[in-house]
Image (cartoon, rainbow, N blue to C red):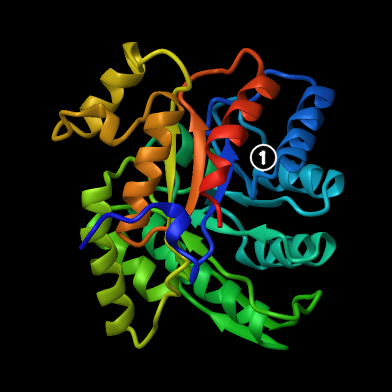
């Protein structure tokens, strides 16, 4: 099949958002407000918040509420929000409230959290219980959004005659991440969209088929335009130092780092097109290191990369 560029895809919506990962934002509230305003002014589709208790990244719910109050078109989501350790009834209430107050601009994405004992302690969970907690919590949240009254008695959570509002005009689409086989099965079984990271375009094609098979096995189907990817990039210097060493430890099988981390707008565009060619349409760019001038950075990306949207 001949290669296709992002601009040739009319049936699905190619969209590009931005996030800051877990490095946090060493700014004042005023600086952060200007950052959010720039994203909307320049036409970015969405803003994504990662979560680490042990770090400077802000709480995703607080950050999303701040962004929602300053904007009218910018969407916002979590990449990802940790679910094990949170009360799913309260999370369902928070997500429904943000959806209603923002005009349905929220893109909820959940995960198990980092494999870090400090994070597990912060959430009050043990590593072995995170997956079953997650599965039960997400299924309960879906019931709370879609049913008028819910009674649940499970291994980790229980509630009786709970009715969570505000009621939404349409169900929330839930996105999940992860690339391990067990995570791909969870995506197919439970998710409305998939947003992985640290994955090559070749791997993405193979793993997308695994997600589709898992969804089919569960009697479900994920929409074709609900496959995305987080792309860590550098707009200038090649990635090096402890960042690359850490990634090589995590992905020792990858010899060409440009397959994971593009440097410069030309490589960013090329990598996005490679993902589009294997069926991905939603992209989140995350800088690999702190950006000295965020307005200039976003203007550069907007002028050279946002043209890939259709």
Q: Is residue 78 visible?
A: yes
Q: Residue at x 34, y 51 (%)?
A: 275
How many marks are shown on the rendered structure? 1
- List x then y, in percent, for residue 26: 67, 18
Q: Is residue 111 visible?
A: no
**What crowding class fits label 1: few (fewer than 14 Cα within 10 Å), some (14-19), or many (20 or more)?**
some
| Residue 263 placement, left or right of 45 | left
The residue closer to the viewer here, 165 or 10, is 10
- List x then y, in percent, for residue 16: 55, 47
| Residue 138 placement, left or right of 87 | left
Locate residue 160: give its quadrant.
bottom right
The residue closer to the viewer here, 187 or 254, is 254
- List x then y, in percent, for residue 20: 57, 32
| Residue 200 placement, left or right of 116 | left
The residue closer to the viewer here, 150 or 173, is 173
Q: Residue at x 47, y 66 (%)?
A: 226
Q: Is residue 128 above or below residue 96?
A: above
Q: Which residue is mark 1?
A: 59
Q: Is residue 176 above or below residue 82?
A: below
């Amino acid at each position: 099949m001949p290669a296709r560029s992002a601009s040739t895809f009319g049936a699905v919506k190619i969209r590009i958002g931005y996030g800051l990962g877990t490095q946090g934002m060493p700014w004042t509230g005023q600086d952060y407000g200007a950052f959010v305003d720039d994203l909307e002014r320049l036409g970015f589709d969405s803003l994504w918040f990662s979560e680490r208790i042990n770090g400077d990244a802000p709480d995703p719910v607080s950050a999303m509420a701040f962004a929602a109050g300053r904007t009218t078109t910018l969407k916002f989501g979590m990449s990802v929000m940790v679910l094990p350790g949170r009360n799913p009834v309260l999370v369902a209430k928070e997500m429904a409230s943000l959806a209603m107050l923002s005009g349905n601009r929220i893109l909820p994405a959940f995960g198990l959290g980092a494999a870090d004992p400090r994070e597990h302690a912060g959430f009050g969970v043990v590593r072995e219980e995170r997956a079953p907690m997650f599965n039960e919590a997400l299924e309960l949240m879906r019931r709370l959004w879609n049913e008028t009254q819910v009674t649940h008695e499970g291994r980790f959570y229980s509630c009786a005659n709970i009715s969570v509002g505000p009621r939404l005009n349409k169900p929330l689409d839930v996105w999940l991440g992860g690339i391990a086989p067990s995570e791909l099965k969870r995506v197919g079984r439970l998710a409305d969209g998939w947003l992985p990271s640290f994955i090559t375009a070749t791997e993405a094609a193979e793993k997308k088929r695994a997600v589709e098979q898992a969804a089919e096995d569960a009697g479900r189907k994920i929409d074709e335009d609900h496959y995305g990817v987080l792309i860590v990039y550098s707009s200038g210097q090649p990635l090096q130092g402890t960042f690359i060493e850490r990634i090589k430890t995590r992905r020792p099988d990858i010899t060409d780092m440009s397959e994971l981390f593009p440097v410069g707008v030309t490589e960013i565009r090329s990598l996005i097109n490679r993902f589009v060619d294997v069926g991905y349409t939603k992209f989140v760019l995350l800088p690999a290191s702190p950006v000295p001038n965020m307005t200039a950075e976003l203007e550069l990306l907007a002028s050279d990369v946002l043209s890939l949207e259709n």
